[in-house]
């Protein structure tokens, strides 16, 4: 299936509009945060003169749209300001922390895709059998138990006094402690995230496949005398995976949320922990830049999913204007 | 084909509404998932509602010298780090979670379903505009948008409800819209258009009943997710504020005492997990009962 260039160009324009809208939302929300930035930096007992001097330095006395344009243009040029809390350039902070979160995200994504989709298909094919019951039962537990409970549970078992194979938290870079040390800090967070996301994705794959396996065209394919393997793998999976592709991109969002919580549980110094810290300490520059960055990544992931979706389903054509 | 599908949307037997309702209740109760879900949820809901009567202690009352006690004796499930009775706190803790789950999902559904059906059916520029806006809201991962809103409005249960409803509205709208798009191409919609039915009639009397299964599944799963997101916010210290008991917050304080006692962590975790599990099972069971296409799975 050919994805038309016009469609792609159109999508790109929308994405830029989308990102501008996001930046307005993020800026809007963070600007009306209770508590003035200058007061936050100087503390509660600062004199009014000092506050107004700093406000002028930070440009907080300017009209709001000028503040927005200033903020956006400096964001685009890579000067993301200085963190109130860490007193370091936000850019450096986010790059260091973001890379650590990225390790978690990439490893988790690879694990869940290779486990959950096959399991979902198996559960749907053996619908209502003991295999389905077992897989579905476990997936229910995975989806219902919050990641901070799973994470804490794993900590108790694998980092506790009884069976302490892994460190209870923290992080060591490859250059500091070698690959073994690095991995030992990553195993438990990734396991927690995988348990969370596998259930999610597998359940959706199964639901979708069960519906499709009961549809008329599958019945027709069976009546035609095709063997079950062809029916499932060629006819059903192709259609069953279409929503799954979108859902995989959507579950990236829940994965990012999961990372925030999991980093908190394992004291893993990644982007998620940085965001939570900046919410509690009202570190506005960090909050703005990190959320904008995450939204940026997420938007492009969704674009990729849309393109794959169009590729898999010839009936949905985004190219034409008839829709 | 189209008419067959349309007719079987409603529960087949029975003439009056009461009869249909009886059939529906019967099939809900005879569905295994619904039954397990309800078995989990009924005692939790009853205990939570009756917390003031059942709870042996005031949930915020501290007992000096009885900190981090193990279950048994004076305290059925033990005590926390301030010597507060865990059984009482777990019972009261359900109130904020259940309230948050139901109200935020209700709020999100009442916005998301009409938006999705309308947008999908109308199509064209209007659809595109609405979906762009929804996409923008969805381009910020749910927990992060909730964090941002809570950061703006300040921590607390009510603000968490608003944040979660805002986060879930575009997600519900998108699922509803994509179901609408597939139903829209069916012949009975064209038949209704040929009959000259109004757009409102087609949206809510023709399309909505035919997408009821994804809508119900979405709604029921959202209750579980809303409770989960709310608990996550509380775990991060941004949801329900102390001293009000809350499962998520209890787990986060229990985390600091993990090496001294396991009970403090275990009870709120079990209750929270069981509640979310109950809602998920109930949602899927309802789907089996209500979806006309999966008749056979009613036995499960």
Image (cartoon, rainbow, N blue to C red):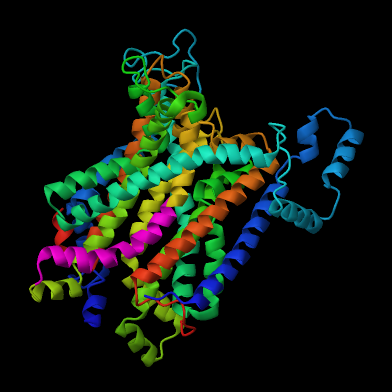
Look at 41% across and 17% down and name the residue there. B79
Q: Quadrant of the N terminus of chain A?
A: bottom left
Taking depth in this image into account, of A146 and A70 the one nearest to the observer is: A70
Q: Return the residue nearer the eye: B56 or A88.
A: A88
Magenta highlight on residue A231: yes
Q: Residue furthest right?
A: A49
Residue A39 image point, x, y percent: 79, 35
Query: Which residue sits at x=66%, y=42%?
Result: A91
Count all numbered tags in the image, as a single digit: 0
- Type of secondary structure dominating the magenta stretch: helix
User: Does residue B209 appear to the left or right of A53 in the view shown?
Assistant: left
Q: Is residue A197 magenta?
A: no
Can you give x and y, in whole percent of width and height, for residue B52 in the image?
43, 31
| Front-lying residue, B251 or A197 | A197
Is residue A62 shown left or right of residue B73? right
- Horizontal relation, residue A135 to residue B188: left or right: left
Q: What percent of the width, then of the height, locates residue A281?
A: 66, 34
Of the pair A89 and B134, the residue shown nearer to us: A89
Does residue B286 sit above or below A34 in this rendering? below
Task: Magenta stretch: give its range.
Answer: A226-251
């Amino acid at each position: 299936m050919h994805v038309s260039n016009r469609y792609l160009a159109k999508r790109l324009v929308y994405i830029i509009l989308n990102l501008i809208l996001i930046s307005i939302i993020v800026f809007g929300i963070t600007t009306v945060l209770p508590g003035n930035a200058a007061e936050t930096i100087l503390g509660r007992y600062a004199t009014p003169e000092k506050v107004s001097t700093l406000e002028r330095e930070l440009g907080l006395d300017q009209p709001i749209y000028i503040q927005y344009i200033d903020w956006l243009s400096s964001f685009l040029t890579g000067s993301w300001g200085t963190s109130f809390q860490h007193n370091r350039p936000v850019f450096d902070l986010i790059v260091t922390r973001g890379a650590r979160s990225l390790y978690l995200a990439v490893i988790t994504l690879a694990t869940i895709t290779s486990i959950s989709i096959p399991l979902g298909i198996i559960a749907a094919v053996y619908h209502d059998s003991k295999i389905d019951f077992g897989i579905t039962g476990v997936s229910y537990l995975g989806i219902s138990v919050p990641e901070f409970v799973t994470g804490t549970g794993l900590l108790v078992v694998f980092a506790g006094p009884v069976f302490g194979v892994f460190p209870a938290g923290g992080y060591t870079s490859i250059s500091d402690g070698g690959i073994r040390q690095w991995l030992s800090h990553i195993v438990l967070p990734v396991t927690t995230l995988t348990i969370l996301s596998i259930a999610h994705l597998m359940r959706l794959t199964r639901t979708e496949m069960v519906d499709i396996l009961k549809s008329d065209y599958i019945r027709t394919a069976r009546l035609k005398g095709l063997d079950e393997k062809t029916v499932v793998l060629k006819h059903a999976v192709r259609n069953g995976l279409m929503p799954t592709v979108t859902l995989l991109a959507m579950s990236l969002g829940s994965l990012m949320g999961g990372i925030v919580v999991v980093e908190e549980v394992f004291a893993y110094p990644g982007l998620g922990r940085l965001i939570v810290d900046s919410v509690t300490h009202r570190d506005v520059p960090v909050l703005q830049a990190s959320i904008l960055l995450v939204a940026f990544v997420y938007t492009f992931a969704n674009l990729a999913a849309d393109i794959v979706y169009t590729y898999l389903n010839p009936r949905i054509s985004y190219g034409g204007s008839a829709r | 084909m189209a008419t067959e599908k349309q007719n079987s949307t409603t529960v087949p037997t029975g003439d009056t509404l009461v009869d249909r309702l009886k059939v529906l209740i019967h099939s809900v109760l005879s569905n295994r998932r619904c039954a397990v879900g309800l078995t989990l949820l009924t005692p939790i809901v009853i205990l939570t509602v009756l917390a003031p009567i059942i709870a042996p202690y005031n949930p915020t009352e501290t007992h000096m010298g009885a900190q981090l006690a193990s279950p048994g004796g004076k305290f059925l499930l033990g005590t926390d780090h301030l010597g507060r009775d865990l059984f009482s706190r777990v019972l009261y803790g359900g109130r904020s979670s259940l309230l948050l789950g139901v109200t935020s999902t209700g709020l999100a559904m009442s916005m998301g379903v009409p938006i999705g059906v309308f947008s999908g059916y109308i199509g064209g520029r209007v659809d595109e505009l609405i979906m762009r806006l929804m996409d923008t809201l969805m381009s910020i991962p749910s927990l992060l948008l909730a964090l941002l809103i809570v950061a703006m409005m300040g921590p607390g249960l009510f603000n968490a409800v608003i944040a979660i409803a805002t986060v879930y509205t575009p997600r519900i709208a998108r699922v509803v819209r994509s179901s609408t798009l597939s139903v829209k191409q069916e012949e009975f919609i064209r038949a209704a258009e040929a009959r000259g039915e109004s757009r409102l009639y087609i949206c809510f009397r023709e399309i909505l009943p035919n997408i009821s299964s994804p809508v119900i599944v979405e709604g029921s799963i959202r209750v579980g997710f809303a409770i989960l997101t709310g608990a996550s916010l509380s775990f991060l210290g941004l949801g329900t504020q102390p001293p009000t008991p809350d499962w998520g917050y209890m787990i986060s304080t229990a985390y600091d005492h993990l090496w001294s006692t396991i009970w403090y962590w275990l009870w709120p975790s079990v209750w929270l997990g069981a509640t979310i599990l109950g809602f998920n099972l109930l949602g899927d069971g309802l789907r089996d009962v209500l979806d006309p296409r999966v008749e056979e799975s009613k036995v499960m």
